[in-house]
Amino acid sequence: MKVQVLGCSGAIARGCRTTSFLLGDEVLVDAGTGVGDLSLEQMARINHVLLTHAHLDHVAALPLLLDAVAAHRLASGAGPVQVHALPETVAALRAHVFNDLIWPDFATIPRADAPLLAFHTFAIGDTLTVAGTRIEVLPAVHTVPAAGFAVHGVQGCWVFSGDTGPNPAFWARVNALPVAMLVIETAFSDRERDIAHRSLHLAPHALAEELGHIDASRPRFPIYITHTKPAETELIMQQIRRFDDPGHHPGHTRHDIRWLAAGDVFEV
């Protein structure tokens, strides 16, 4: 299965798009501003959107995507785009986005019995089958109800932490999965560690502690850093390289840490 990185930045700037991944041709994981780089034809093929949580950087493109493909879906009889999320995320979208004030309620357009948008709720621990792909819902610890995902592929699991602070339950499940690669957020540098702590994001010192939960007896897998703030990306990278250097930390086992970039494509 192909995983394409549409956006992986913690904020916008030239060349920076917020979180979104395309699985195959028809499944989005999160709908940040990276969705806007797809062609209209690519957008029209998207039938499912899985959301980690309701924050704007992860849902901003969803209402615009629906507007862009509405005419095509109505003309082709493609049916609604299926949005899968936690109940609290669905409630937030209904109340604050698709409310006929911020954006039209596509869950009732053009008719309530034939809408352009259909919501489906899941719970942490659920395993979904979406467009023929098995996707497990993983726990996240954030300022709003949130989730991560493990996407099961031929070569193992593509695991995405979502937005999260320290999260022991996540690692308990990761250690039981055949992980092919892990995508994990590190939103702030250590100079902003207090903000990271309050906002339940990771900074490099917390990332180091989190990676310490990985079962050392299992084969190594690549760990991709995502969601860095554009103004701090270089500093975050420097700080992660420093903590991951066994020369600075005797007895430390180096992880296979890499940097995620929009446009990256992986096969799992």
Image (cartoon, rainbow, N blue to C red):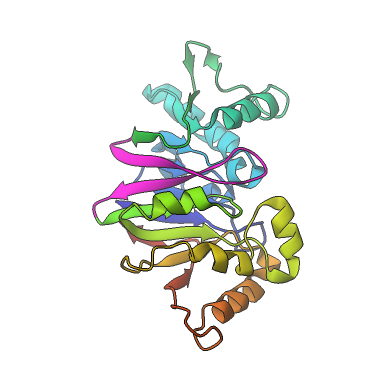
Residue 230 at what x, y percent from top left? 66, 65
Image quadrant in which you'd find residue 82: top left
Magenta: main secondary structure equals strand
Q: Would residue 140 be counted in the magenta stretch?
A: yes
Residue 79 at what x, y percent from top left? 40, 22
Residue lying at 44% horizontally and 78% vertically, measured from the top left: 254
- Is residue 80 found left or right of 130 in the rendered image? right
Image quadrant in which you'd find residue 229: bottom right
Magenta range is 130-154
- Is residue 136 found left or right of 259 in the rendered image? left
Q: Nearer the viewer, residue 84 or 206?
A: 206
Residue 101 at what x, y percent from top left? 73, 24
Residue 67 at what x, y percent from top left? 56, 32
Residue lying at 49% horizontally and 54% vertically, measured from the top left: 6
* Residue reaching furthest to the bottom: 247
Residue lying at 58% horizontally and 81% vertically, measured from the top left: 242
- Is residue 212 found left or right of 190 in the rendered image? left
- Residue 37 visible in the shown view: no
The correct choice, above or below, for 178 with respect to 54 in the image is below
- Residue 179 visible in the shown view: yes
